[in-house]
Image (spheres, rainbow, N blue to C red):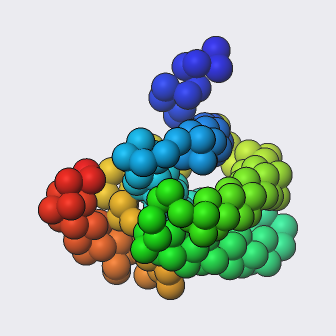
């Protein structure tokens, strides 16, 4: 049963929780690798983090603000953590993947992201699961999959709101994909 949830979760909470597991795995693979393998693992990790946060910012956070008790405060804290992570990702992009500084920063980012994911699952996802119907969660899951398809592939600090994502998202995604193709990292 767990395998089918990872392949194609229909509920937004299952979808994002399975991405958390993929993110955790990619952090481990990236930290364990060297050279070109580490570089490619980091590109994959960066892309998944950018897509994941975009989906949360466009689909989940706005709903959580309205539907869960103290939603604005819960979401505000998550958005602050997401902004900080995007800044670290931008710093990491400028470093040699085999440098000690890259490893140190990536390890700090991993710890922060895993803590962030735990808070999301407990304080936001679980509470949405209690407040929303199965139909609403599945509708949000379908929307999440659509948002995933057009999300930027790189972090964009300062684009942590639904409005900012809707304005910047498609353009940023187009630029990111062009940059990825030019650099051969797509």
Give x and y (percent) for residue 35. Answer: 42, 48
The quadrant of the image that shows the N terminus is top right
Give x and y (percent) for residue 47. Answer: 42, 55
Give whichever of 18, 70 is nearer the camera: 18
Quadrant of res 76: bottom right
Quadrant of res 82: bottom right
Q: Vertical placement of 93 versus 113: above or below? A: below
Describe residue 32's horizontal placement relative to residue 152 as left or right.
right
Give whichever of 167, 41 is nearer the camera: 41
Describe residue 104's horizontal placement relative to residue 159 as left or right.
right
Residue at 69% x, 73% y: name it. Answer: 81
Give x and y (percent) for residue 10. Answer: 52, 34
Residue at 30% x, 73% y: name it. Answer: 172
Residue that extends furthest to the top in the rendered view of this protein: 1
Q: Vertical placement of 159 versus 98: above or below? A: below
Residue that extends furthest to the bottom in the rendered view of this protein: 158
Describe residue 151's horizontal placement relative to residue 86 as left or right.
left
Residue at 65% x, 20% y: name it. Answer: 2
Residue 74 visible (yes or no): yes
Residue 136 visible (yes or no): no
Q: How many labels does the image show?
A: 0
Residue at 36% x, 60% y: name it. Answer: 153
Q: Vertical placement of 33 versus 161: above or below? A: above
Give whichever of 106, 6 is nearer the camera: 106
Describe residue 71's horizontal placement relative to residue 5 as left or right.
right
Give x and y (percent) for residue 48. Answer: 47, 51
């Amino acid at each position: 049963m767990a395998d089918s949830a990872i392949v194609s979760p229909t509920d937004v909470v299952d979808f994002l929780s399975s991405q958390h597991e993929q993110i955790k795995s990619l952090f481990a693979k990236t930290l364990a690798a060297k050279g070109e393998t580490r570089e490619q693992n980091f590109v994959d990790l960066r892309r998944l983090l950018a897509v994941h946060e975009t989906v949360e910012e466009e689909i989940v956070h706005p709903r959580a603000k309205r539907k869960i008790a103290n939603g604005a405060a819960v979401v505000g804290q998550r958005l602050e953590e997401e902004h900080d992570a995007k800044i670290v990702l931008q710093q990491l992009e400028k470093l040699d993947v085999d440098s000690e500084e890259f490893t140190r920063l990536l390890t700090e980012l991993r710890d922060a992201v895993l803590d962030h994911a735990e808070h999301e699952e407990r304080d936001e996802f679980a509470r949405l699961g209690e407040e929303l119907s199965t139909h609403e969660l599945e509708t949000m899951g379908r929307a999440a999959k659509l948002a995933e398809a057009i999300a930027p592939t790189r972090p964009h600090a300062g684009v942590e709101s639904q409005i900012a994502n809707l304005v910047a998202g498609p353009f940023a995604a187009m630029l990111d994909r062009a940059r990825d193709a030019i650099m051969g990292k797509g």
